[in-house]
Amino acid sequence: MPDLGLNVLFEGSNFLRLLLGLWVTVKISLLSVSLSIILGFFLGILMTGKHPLIRILSTLYLEFVRIMPQLVLLFLVYFGLTKAFHVNLSGTASAILVFVLWGTAEMGDLVRSALISIPKHQYESASALGMTTPQVYRYIIAPQTLRRLLPLAINLTTRMIKTTSLVALIGVVEVLKVGQQIIEANRFHAPTAAMGIYGTIFLLYFLVCFLFSRLAKQAERYGKD
Amino acid sequence: MKRAKTILTLLLSVSFTLLLLASCGGKEPSASEGSPQAPSGNPARTLSQIKESGKIIIGVFSDKAPFGYVDSNGTYQGYDVYFGNRIAKDLGVAAEYVSVEPASRVEYLVTGKVDLILANFTVTEERAQAVDFALPYMKVALGVVSPTNALITAPEQLSGKTLIVAKGTTAEMFFTKNYPEVKLLKFDQYTEAYEALLDGRGDAFSTDNTEVLAWALQNQGYTVGIERLGNLDIIAPAVQKGNTELLGWLNEEIVSLASEQFFHGNFEATLAPVYGDSVDPDNLVVEGGKLD
């Protein structure tokens, strides 16, 4: 077996630092995902409406955020806000703001598509039974939408977790950056460490994302009953 | 149905406004137009503000050993950091290091997010328009590494031969401009370039001399035949444009440190363990901001 340089991982507090980096990654993505799901839900309902102004605005917002690379958004918020408005956000705050903006747009579109995929007769039958609009949404539409939404939302979550590696560029040291720091610090006495460190990071990312998809599977099964 | 949507619209706009307000409200700059130059970002902190706060915020690389890196205990180390620690000590404050990337160094200063950049910052004309450089504390030139049994000791020996370079480096620009008769084999990444040299796909490889010198130490059978080539690039601390007070202090500091040969000591402490005897400190270190 080739030398993977795994011993580097256990020098000093390297492994602990990797885990702390992972915590930064998970913290940013979980906060952003929860906020995005709440805000995205409202946005999605709005987007199914027929008001032309709301439609245009939400489409503009969605396309803008979707077309812009997340890195550009990060720079815009972290450096741009300071430059233009003297607003000095920390790296982590900027990252969460950008991911919430992005996640809300994506989530809104997912909610919209889940909502319009519910056949019209579901609404009509519910109304025919004498339910009020909030009741229709609460008892008929929401449960069906949620079930359709779950896999898509998990997909967005794992994508977000992976995209957090960009925040290193605005000075937030997350798991990937810690890994690169460890590799570079040992460049001269353990040049082969890259393989082992990147492999470990791969495993860490995998474990976190896998945990989420397992949870989603459970929730899906639970939702079916 | 209609009413529900109106309410939702309201809710959404309120939450967005709140979000915006929350992000704005945090740090409303007090009297931000105080400085005469009124730079576009937050104004840099003055020397007394830095001393009052008890810490100086310094942007360094966290993954460029041996110049700026984080050791296995999570502490910042390296040639740049050694200097940063001394600056903090002489100011009587603690040093707080921020990890920066090559492309974001100027922005960090422009927006006042750091007081000082010590991240292997090469002085160029373009950069000097955006930030203020203090006196240099290091210099780098190009180096050329080749197999010891077919050593290249002068650029003229390369005509008709293949030279490996990394794209976008000063080496690529230098040889394209000055030695067009040299065939260039270009790669995106350093690792690819080094592998090409090991495979014999080129006769030599050129990049910053610090890089090739460190690499030649690790790879037997390869020697740096040309240690200094092309324009000398100088590396200096940088502060926000117009922060003359900090700049002046830094320049005095660098001049006064020459009396104790501080940067030679820095070399011994941080670079010598890596380069050993393969590098003459005088080829890298600048004392008192004076280039020879």
Image (cartoon, coloured by chain):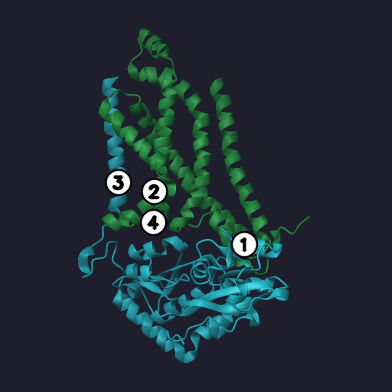
Chain colours: A green, B cyan
Work out whether residue B202 or residue B251 is closer to the camera in this orientation and state it: B202
- Placement of B139 over or under B161, stated as above or below: below
- Give me the disc on residue A73: 2
Answer whether labels 2 and 4 touch (C-beta < 8 Å). no
* Distance in Å between CA atoms under marks 2 and 3: 15 Å
Query: Which amino acid, by three-letter code, is at mark 3?
Result: Leu
Residue ID for mark 1 = B193
- Placement of A29 over or under B187, stated as above or below: above
* Distance in Å between CA atoms under marks 3 and 4: 15 Å
Residue ID for mark 3 = B20
The chain holding disc 4 is A
Same subunit under labels 2 and 3?
Answer: no
Work out whether residue B103 or residue B41 is closer to the camera in this orientation and state it: B103
Query: Which amino acid, by three-letter code, is at mark 4?
Result: Ser
- Give me the disc on residue A115: none
Which residue sits at x=64%, y=83%? Answer: B277
The chain holding disc 2 is A
Q: Residues within 10 Å of mark 3 (few under 14, many from 20)?
A: few
The residue mark sitting in front, 2 or 3, is 2
* Distance in Å between CA atoms under marks 1 and 4: 37 Å
Answer whether labels 1 and 4 touch (C-beta < 8 Å). no
List x then y, in percent, for residue A76. 36, 52
Residue ID for mark 4 = A90
- Position of B54 compared to A156: left or right? left
The chain holding disc 1 is B
- Position of A30 compared to B243: left or right? right
Secondary structure under badge 3?
helix
Q: Residues within 10 Å of mark 2 (few under 14, many from 20)?
A: many
